[in-house]
Amino acid sequence: MTEQRSSQWYAGDDRNAYIHRAWMRRGLPQHAFDGRPHIAIANTASDLTPCNAHFDEVAASVKQGVYEAGGIPVNLPVVSLGETLMRPTAMLWRNMAAMATEELFRGNPIDGVVLLGGCDKTIPALLMAAASVDLPAVVVPGGPMLTGTFRGRPLGCGTDVWRLSEETRAGSLSQEQFARSESSMIRSRGHCNTMGTASTMGLLAEALGMVIPGLAGTPAPDSRLLAASHESGRLAVDLVRQDRRPSSILTRAAFHNAIVALAAIGGSTNAVVHLLAIAGRLGITLNLDDIDHIGAEVPLLVDLQPAGRFLMEDLHRAGGLRPVLREVRDLLDATARTVTGGLLVDGLDEAEIWDTEVIRRRAAPIRECAGIAVLRGNLAPSGAVIKPAAASPELLRHRGRAVVFDSIEDMNARIDSPELDVDADSVLVLRGCGPRGYPGMPEVANMPLPRKLLERGVRDMVRICDGRMSGTAYGTVVLHVAPEAAAGGPLALVRTGDPIVLDVEARTIDVDIEQAELDRRSPPAELTDALADPARGWERLYVDHVMQADTGADLDFLRGSTGDRVSRESH
């Protein structure tokens, strides 16, 4: 047997080997140190990440699989980011979670890892870490929650929060009924049951080849998740023995397939910044043009909220990701491999669609071309994104006067004011919400509509922001504007009343102002005074080193992979 990495700690009879073994003898038998693979279970379980709260049970099944395959499992709690609770935004700490996890992988006596992620930032952070240290790894997505109901109809968590809150603000739903829906929305363990970021990244982890095929999207309470977790533990031991590392799986072909899958499932716009960041850790050249060009002609086949009608439990019942990939097989790169050692396309012929309302046939798509569109123009020289499948078709080509908000606080203070000079054709502009300006690029871009317009029946408007929006959200929202206002982007120069022109088909977003006039302008004090200027800690490090959205909003010194080597002893 080839010497395992962990043997660098445990093998031998000197003082350091003695220390390493002795402190681990808390139930481990003598043969735990005879060269068997040690598999870390990177566990993002936390009561404050409610979508991942069941991971200790999942980890127990992984542990059994590792033992059965002849490995030694070790539980490794890692940074856990709860999307719904963390302020100012969980995205502020995605890079920190990835950095801390990478260092834990590299600095500990482990040979391989099983990555337990679910809530939005946990799978991206784990994949960024695994890519950077390049130890054999497999992902176990924690799975979506079961469908809740309210007043006899299914509730999509996230999506229906936005819908019901707007109905309440419009006066068509009472505050009492809105409060009553709260106890109906979260029916079980698991992450959001819409095609939000958590569901998207679980499915894309499989499309990237890092999940046992067919596992992603299994509901969290489903006993088959535990069975697959057991199998993932077994596989982790095989990955180590065969020296199959993420760098051999997360290839350019794998990212091509993830972009195809993103369009076919109607996935979250947040996947764009995560895919770009993961690719950056591997040294793979991936940019916004790739997202657009590869995904542009991919049909939307999955009819899930927020772009459609159904929920994740329905997708699993209808067959899951595999039959979706079968329908777009001609668009996939057939050379991409998975953690199993086979090709992603292996076995797709046997993948059946069991409900053609939930998963459409290629011949009858929901939309012919569903990829996330990348826009450029004098408002977004480095690019911005929009999800046409979640937008109002009549607004995809639009001209309107800007109504500008200089911060999230400014927007909250004025959006419902009767004096706000706004109409249905106006374009709402929110700035100062990018990676550097907020900081952390929060999910605020899907701004609430002005109350007086809601009361008149308006349910969508063009909105532009240098921040993000929840993958569960919907509307005609231009996101990830780069450069952001805080980095000198032209969004900082827009004034209320300026004409904004959006043309998604032409892939343009512009302010119809002469360049000479823009050059004469300066950002207003209301904007610059509201930008983040932390004095210390992670926020200071983040603001000083975060890159822009068009490259994945990673830190500049974290790009690339360092590998698993540690050169010095600890004693």
Image (cartoon, rainbow, N blue to C red):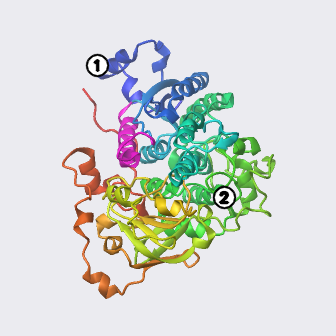
Which residue is drawn at the image coordinates 64% and 32% (left, top)?
225
Type of amino acid at the residue the image marks with label 1: Arg
Report helix, strand or loop for mark 2. Answer: helix
Q: Nearer the viewer, residue 83 or 34?
A: 83
User: Residue 135, image x and y in percent?
Assistant: 47, 40
Q: Nearer the viewer, residue 363 or 473?
A: 473
Residue 292 can be seen, yes or no: yes
Mark number displayed over residue 15: 1
Residue 56 horizontal side relative to residue 299, left or right: left
Mark number displayed over residue 264: 2
Marks 2 and 1, how far apart in space?
Answer: 56 Å
Does the stretch in magenta take in 85? yes
Q: Which residues are magenta?
A: 83-108
Picture quadrant where residue 258 is located: bottom right
Count of labels in the image = 2
Q: Report the magenta stretch's main SS.
A: helix
Picture quadrant where residue 47 is located: top left
Q: Nearer the viewer, residue 350 or 26?
A: 350
Task: Please identify, in this view, whether the residue under mark 2 or under mark 1 is nearer the observer.
Answer: 2
Which residue is drawn at the image coordinates 73% and 63% (left, top)?
330
